[in-house]
Amino acid sequence: MAQSELEQLLSATAKGDKAAFHALYNATSAKLFGVAVRILKRSDLAEDVIQDAYLKIWDAAPNFRPALGSPISWMVAITRNRAIDVLRKRTEVGVEDQKDGGEREDDALDPYEMTAQNRELKALLSCMERLNPDQRQCLLMAYYYGYTHEEISERMSTPVGTVKSWIRRGLARVKECLGDG
Amino acid sequence: MVRREMDILAGEYALGTLNADERSEAERLKVSDAAFARAVSEWEERLSPLSEAVPPIEPPDSAWNKIEASLVAPSPVVSTALTDLAEQMVDLKRSLSLWRYATMGAVAAALALAIVWMGGLDTPFRQAAPEERYVAMLQSEKGETGFVITMNMPGKQFAIRPVSVQEPTSKSYELWAIMKDGKKPPMTLGLVGTGAYAMMDAPAEIDHKMLEEGVQLAISLEPKGGAPTGKSMGPVMFAGLLVKQTP
């Protein structure tokens, strides 16, 4: 769905239009659910997350400002924030995931393999391409899986301080490269 | 924090790599610092194209059914007069000076109402001097008043009045205090019902001195029975500042 259509649905949602909200859900829920499943690796938890995320979207729709970003970025950010909060909470209380075959750990995601990249993704990827491969890998792991510095450090067998500085430098360079640094 | 450091912290938050404590810290900054909140939004927008590489997955039908069932339709349970007065207070929580200025008018009338509620109760509230009374209107992002809270200082008992709010489906509302110094994570004041006016006691960990003018009160949506870790994880549904009834 085009950005302008999503904006219209979101603006009707802001006025309490449930039909528009349902259309917005139909147009975006597979994307948001995919994002949540990727981070939580469990569809039951991801379902709770998108439920909370859409309620937040319903409540916060009047605060959405098209000038500051696209509807889908805004909705993705709400979903990811919620999913990462849940992920952190589970890690903190030491919940062990049951191995139920739904694990997606090895299902690596490489945005560079995508054939249909839109303009924004192309620009971001070409900026990330200028980073060294380790920096890039850290940023992608953090974005797709919500891993902490500590978790990335374990997975890459690299000291946490190094991971932190890779991420910080990587972010700074991406921002600069995109022309708003 | 210098600007550049703050911007990178915003980037790390948006990227999703901060641990639980660092995240709470960033979330607090997001509420208290508009420049930081803007930096976070900019990072979210900047990184968002990456999400296009995530394969979409159709959620089960049950997801929409639960969302639809939880949509809170405004259902005033009090007289229109109070709701109207409450609406006039929408922006006051953002501005204590405006709060003081406006006490001459509608706000004073609403507070008078609050006193009437208190006056009708046979509780220690009755003996307290009016200048010790604190009030918070907790509102949704849409500006609907969900709860009115009154506290007497010193003391740890408070009254909570649901105004226009429905019980969430298979979730609980939990009340939190975000202290003024901003150093501590939000502290829970307990679960709140949506049915009747209730008196509650602040938990032992909360010293009455912590509950002062400018403390932010917020109600979040948590799993049934409250946040299991003692930290708020759910979305904030209502929020408002605690202010002295008489400046």
Image (cartoon, grey):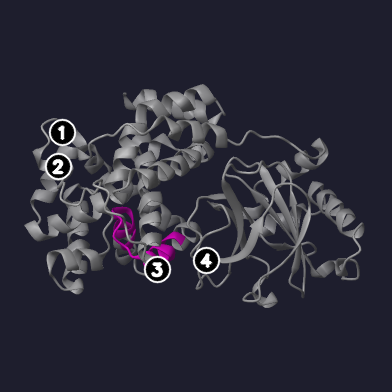
Question: Which corner quadrant holds the N terminus of chain A?
Answer: top left
Q: Which mark is residue A117?
A: 1
Tell which of A115 and B46 is nearer to you.
A115
**Is A125 a magenta residue?**
no
Instruction: Verify CB contact (< 8 Å) between mark 1 and mark 2.
Output: yes
Q: Is residue B10 above or below residue A11?
A: below
Q: Is residue B82 above or below residue B212?
A: above
Q: Which residues are magenta?
A: B9-27
Measure the C-alpha gap from mark 2 to mark 4: 38 Å
**Is B19 a magenta residue?**
yes
Question: Which corner quadrant holds the C terminus of chain A?
Answer: bottom left
Tell which of B133 and B247 is nearer to you.
B133
Q: Amino acid at mark 3?
A: Asp
The chain under label 2 reads A
Question: Quick check: can you spot residue A132?
Answer: no
Q: Is residue A100 left or right of residue A16?
A: left
- Residue named by callout 3: B21
- Residue named by callout 2: A111
Marked residue nearer the N-terminal end (1 or 2)? 2
